Amino acid sequence: MRRLPKAIQSLLSNCRGAWVGGIPNQPVPAVLLRLARVAAELGHMPPTAINPAPVYLQLGMALEQFGLGPRPPGPVQVGVSAV
C-alpha cells in the first residue's frame, strides 16, 4: 500500500481541474470512497490516525464536498459495485 497516497493525490488533483489522463469524472467519488476505506482500514484516516498525513485530510474534505462524509465500513453504495 505504498502507492495509496499517490493514488489519492492523483484523483484529488483530477477533481481540482488538473488533468490526469484516463480517469473519467463520473466514478471519481466512488473511487475516492474506496480509497478512503482502504486508508481507514490501514489506520491512516482521522480520527483513527493521531497525526494523519495531509493527503488523508484532503481526502476527507473531498469526500465531504461530494456528500460522502464519514460512513461506516461496508460496500460502496455510490452506484458502482464494490471491487
Image: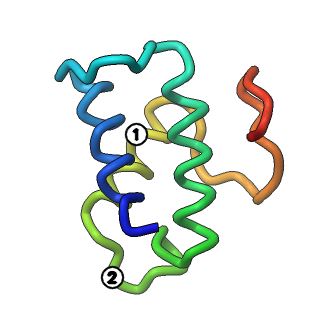
* Residue at (40% x, 49% y) in the render: 59
Q: Are marks 2 and 1 in contact (CB under 8 Å)?
A: no
Amino acid type, residue under disc 2 in the picture: Asn
Relative vertical location of residue 1 with respect to residue 17 in this rendering, above or below: below
The earlier-in-sequence mark between 2 and 1 is: 2
Please, what is the three-letter code of the amino acid marked with disc 1? Ala
User: Percent from the top left, x then y, of residue 65?
Assistant: 44, 32
Marks 2 and 1, how far apart at CA: 18 Å
Residue in the picture at 29% in, 18% down: 21
Q: Element type at marker 2?
A: loop
Q: Count the marks.
A: 2
Query: Where residue 60 sits: x, y (%)?
Result: 44, 52
- Residue 81 location, x and y as percent? 79, 30
Along the horizontal axis of the image, is 71 left or right of 30? right
Q: Residue furthest left?
A: 18
Above/below status of 8 relative to 56 = above
**Relative to 35, is 57 on the left or the right?**
left
Expressed as whole percent of the image width and height from the top left, the position of residue 78 reads 71, 27
Most extreme residue toward the bottom is 50
* 59 over 4 or under it: above or below: above
Q: Looking at the rendering, which quadrant does residue 19 occupy? A: top left
Q: Which residue is mark 2?
A: 51
Crowd around label 2: few <14 · some 14–19 · many ≥20 (10 Å): few
**Callout 1: helix, strand or loop?**
helix
Task: Kindly indicate the quadrant of the structure image that contains residue 37.
Answer: bottom right
User: How packed is label 1: few (under 14 Cα within 10 Å), some, or many (20 or more)?
Assistant: some
Q: Along the line of sight, which residue is nearer the eye, 1 or 60?
A: 1
Q: Which residue is mark 1?
A: 62
Determine whether, in the image, residue 69 is placed left or right of residue 21: right
User: What residue is at 29 percent from the left and 57 percent from the top?
Assistant: 55
Res 21 label: none
